[in-house]
Amino acid sequence: MKRLAALVSVALILAALPPAAHASHEPLEPVTQQAATFALRAIAQAGLFDPLGDYYDYQEITHPGDRWVVSFVAMHCYRNERIETCDPYQGRDSFNVPDAWLEIAELDGSFVITNAFGRFSDEDRDELASYSEPSTPEPGHQEYLTVRVDPSQSEGGVEIRAANIWAGVLPEDDNLWSICRAEILDAEGNVIWTARARHAQKERGEPFRSGGLVYMGAMEVAPGDAASARITCENFSGEIWRPTSGPGVSKVPRRSEVAVAAPVEWLLEDLVSGLESRCEVELFNRAGRMVKAVTKRGPPSPWTRSRLKNNYFSALVRVPHPKRIESATLYCHEA
């Protein structure tokens, strides 16, 4: 069961909820991964990927013969005075098993849906059958297929709810970060609100292709002014923290270690929540020869845990002859 926790009313709150555990997968062919992406987009355009309505949670894709079959667990998401949740049971037993399937074929360079069976209405099937798109594999990236804006349950303001996926061909090492920005638009399409911080998420592989649900509160926006909302994303890699001095190296008494420390500055334009870092440390002796290179956990992004003081790196590094270490370099990038 997916559940949205109760949240206090502030300008921006993000809560990314992972889906339930799925079956494990072997690496999939690129065209099969694109077929899974197509299936989720078809589900969304049929109105079945709604964080406050019908939400069909992706489970897996198989490739029997010349067709693909994609399985889903049909849920219904709702809220009341006490709770907000997505319930997969809906009067069934307590086992969270697939109960809706799409059959997909490739025809003249495009994916088409040849059958929709299981927990679909006739209207759902008609909507799904009308959807098609090119079968060319895309690079892996994050998309928000459904973004809705509703009046807040508290006094004033609005709430954004969104459902995301990881689209295209996903890297086998799960090393893909996406940074996203939320905006609210008026009836003329003008941006009237932009989230104070961007939000970073890391791709976790095929079992989590349907990434989860996101909630934000925008208390300063009047419900009558908000016509729609959008969340746009871009892939990210590269340096995120840089030393402002040093780094310094000091010996640890009675231990075969040195301490490496440096103040660091955040290199991205604005605050980003959720982005993790790794720091490459290289140690050099007095002759300028590199003695050891290690990777250490780096500081979290400034907005993580609502703190703005994660601007320092420190780590202990074990070396055979600490007294011979004279200097160090530091390079911090996405984890």
Image (cartoon, helix red, strand yellow):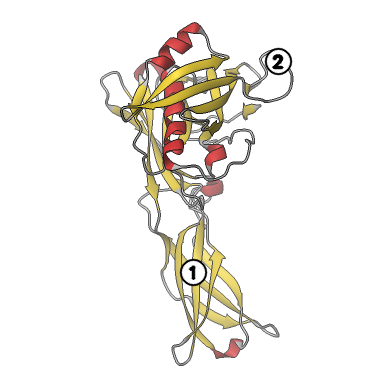
Disc 1 packing (10 Å; few <14; some 14–19; many ≥20): some
Question: Where residue 105 appears, x then y in whole percent?
Answer: 42, 25
Instruction: Residue at 42%, 48% (x, y): give it.
Output: 271
Q: Would you identify the image quadrant in which residue 254 lies? A: bottom right
Instruction: Residue at 66%, 26% (x, y): give it.
Output: 1
Type of amino acid under label 1: Glu
As drawn, 36 above or below 286: above
Question: Where residue 243 appears, x then y in whole percent?
Answer: 43, 69
Question: Where residue 18 appears, x then y in whole percent?
Answer: 58, 36
289 or 216: nearer the viewer: 289
Instruction: Residue at 42%, 44% (x, y): give it.
Output: 179
> What residue is disc 1 on?
280
> What residue is disc 2 on?
92
Q: Residue furthest right?
A: 94
Question: Where residue 88 appears, x then y in whole percent?
Answer: 64, 21
Residue 148 seen in this snapshot: no
Q: CA distance from mark 1 to mark 2?
A: 51 Å
Q: Residue furthest top?
A: 122
Left or right: where 234 falls relative to 85: left
